[in-house]
Amino acid sequence: MEKTAELILDGKTYKLPIVEGTEQERAIDISSLRNQTGYITLDDGYGNTGSCKSQITFIDGEKGILRYRGIPIEELAEKSTFIEVAHLIIMGKLPNNTELRQFSDLLTQNELLDEAMKHHFEGFPAHAHPMAILSAMINAASCFHPELLTDQFRDSFVVQAARLLAKVRTIAAFAYRKSRGLPAIYPNPDLKYTANFLHMMFSLPNRDYELKPEVVKALDLIFLLHADHEQNCSTATVRMVASSRANLFASAAAGVCALWGPLHGGANQAVLEMLQEIHKAGDDGSRFIAAAKDKNSGKRLMGFGHRVYKNYDPRAKIIKKACDEVLTKLHINDPLLDIAKHLEEAALRDPYFVERKLYPNVDFYSGIIMRAIGIPVEMFTVMFAIGRMPGWIANYKEVMEDPTRIYRPRQIYTGATLNHYSSVKDRK
């Protein structure tokens, strides 16, 4: 028997279907509400609105659970790699040896940019933000693949997905080199995905970057932990653009723009800037903690709390351990890490933060790791974009496989009522 919810409006009862997910999440289907009643729902910021059904990622914010295609993030972080997880998220399953080799080969075959794109990089000023370059160049890359604009795209989705995943890394590295006035370093087909990215970032024409296993592993873990995170701002943007039947590259470029915002992808940069501010002030974090509890101070503890997680962010536990390990192995004594640990310990003990469930999130430690690796602050959000690309691609694929109409939210109009045009001489 179908479960329904009852809604009483103006003395009339309406039955609305109840939808239940595989993890017992429940929703009231209101898709026909306006047609039946003339009413819509108002949910500012979509905080309580399910915009789609998805098989990609499951999050339980109250319990601190994150799973890709049903597999706990803890297992993937310990046993898997970013590219294996990318295949899992995009294709729906962990690859066997043959599938992994084929997917890796596709990435290698598509990692180069058309030489004509080098002229586009030259058009940006030296101070251009890498996220601006990344978004623009992803769109530009689509121009070199006209099949993206035809129905043939569906028949070659795996190739197009691999093409975007491979090229975004090359574009990101070229954008960094451009910002530093350095010559572009081409991909090395003998290197795996994350190692190749570091090679393109930091090698010189006459000397290859020394690839330290612990550094490669740490950055690969950051990519893996960010690979998807359900219907966040950038992923929802990708799905909305995809619903118009825009191509994969255009939809991903829109995701980059959404991610660029400081309230989304810029959070790990904000954490590092906060730690630098505390260190510069000669504080070990104690004064800042006190100020953060004062609403009038203007100080905010960055990297704590999450829109979804009301428990410890499971990714934060994983990356905290990795952060300790990479700094130890690199013999780095970073005063910012000491401040970060002090902030974490204080916040986890202080009733003010405990009562508000302001636990450390993944952004709190990812910035410290990237700083240790040598990635500059302005590239932090770009790292996030590279990591999130599998999730964007997978969500794009779901939209394309579902005959859903173009996304079109409603609104409650609060502007002027009926008005009339007046000539310039009559206007006050």
Image (cartoon, rainbow, N blue to C red):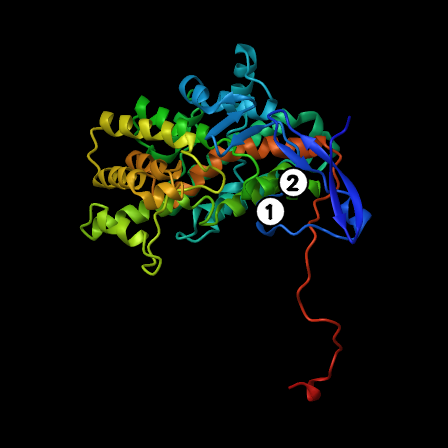
Q: Is residue 208 visible?
A: no
- Residue 49: give x, y in percent of width and height: 63, 43
- Residue 280: give x, y in percent of width and height: 21, 51
Crowd rating for badge 2 (residues with CA inside 10 Å; few <14, some 14–19, many 20+): few
13 shown above or below 248: below
Q: Residue furthest left?
A: 282
Residue at horizontal 75%, vertical 72%? 418
Q: Quadrant of the N terminus?
A: top right
Q: Quadrant of the C terminus?
A: bottom right
Query: Mark 1 is on which residue type?
Result: Tyr
- Residue 394: give x, y in percent of width and height: 60, 30
- Residue 161: give x, y in percent of width and height: 59, 29
Residue at horizontal 67%, vertical 85%? 427
Image position of 326 (left or right of 116): left
Give the residue number, with chain letter if any, for mark 1. 46
Does the residue at mark 2 contact the one at mark 1 (Cβ under 8 Å)? yes
User: Reading the chain from its start, which is encountered first: label 2 or label 1?
Assistant: 1
Give the camera-side residue of 160 and 119: 160
Give the camera-side residue of 143 and 364: 364
Q: Secondary structure at mark 2?
A: loop
Give the residue number, with chain letter if any, for mark 2. 51
Image position of 172 (left or right of 92): left
Crowd rating for badge 1 (residues with CA inside 10 Å; few <14, some 14–19, many 20+): few
Q: Is residue 94 visible?
A: yes
